[in-house]
Amino acid sequence: MVKRKRFKKNQPFKWKHYSGEIILWLVRWYGRYALSYRDLKEIAAERGLEIERSTICRWVHEYGSQIAKRLRPHFRQTCASWRLDETLVKIKGRWYYLYRAIDKYGHALDWMLSRQQNAKAALRFFKKQWLNLT
């Protein structure tokens, strides 16, 4: 009789083909440095990993907000000058508004997806950024 390894309930990367460390690095690089999925695929290929862009995209959508929430307390204070960028993106056939806070050096500080483009969504994101950065 073969004993099967029991998994803990709190294993977010259970049944993933790649290790959690690889997933964390790629999602973190996407959110922090505003790299495209193609760029991340090339970076992974340089390290000997064959990962499709669509796989990285799924990881960003699945783990991005959780990772951002856990890392936010560890971010260093940024410069006083930053901008709010709004972009319309299509995800799985639906249109979303992507709000990004960018510092004067072009580094992405944070991002938020919203189904609606309205002042309330932008103001909510702006207030969250203001509280985090001051």
Image (cartoon, helix red, strand yellow):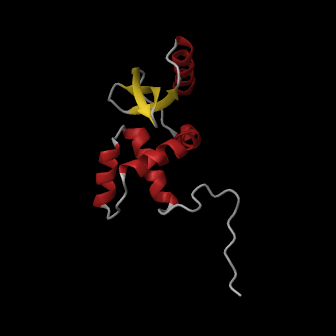
Question: Which quadrant holds residue 37?
Answer: top left
**Picture layout, residue 85 above or below residue 75:** above
Question: Which quadrant holds residue 132?
Answer: top right
Question: Toward the viewer: 130 or 29?
Answer: 29
The N terminus: image quadrant: bottom right
Task: State the residue at coordinates (68%, 56%).
Answer: 10
**Picture layout, residue 22 above or below residue 118:** below
Instruction: Name the outermost residue toward the front.
Output: 93
Apparent side of residue 43 relative to residue 116 in the rendered image (left or right): left
Task: State the residue at coordinates (47%, 54%).
Answer: 23
Apparent side of residue 56 relative to residue 123 in the rendered image (left or right): left
Question: Toward the viewer: 58 or 23?
Answer: 58
Apparent side of residue 85 relative to residue 119 in the rendered image (left or right): left
Task: State the residue at coordinates (40%, 48%).
Answer: 54
Question: Toward the viewer: 97 or 79?
Answer: 97
Instruction: Name the outermost residue toward the bottom.
Output: 1
Q: Residue 108 placed where, x, y %?
A: 40, 32
Task: State the residue at coordinates (45%, 57%).
Answer: 22
- Number of marks drawn: 0
Q: Residue 76 placed where, x, y %?
A: 48, 36
Apparent side of residue 98 relative to residue 121 in the rendered image (left or right): left
Q: Residue 131 placed where, x, y %?
A: 57, 23
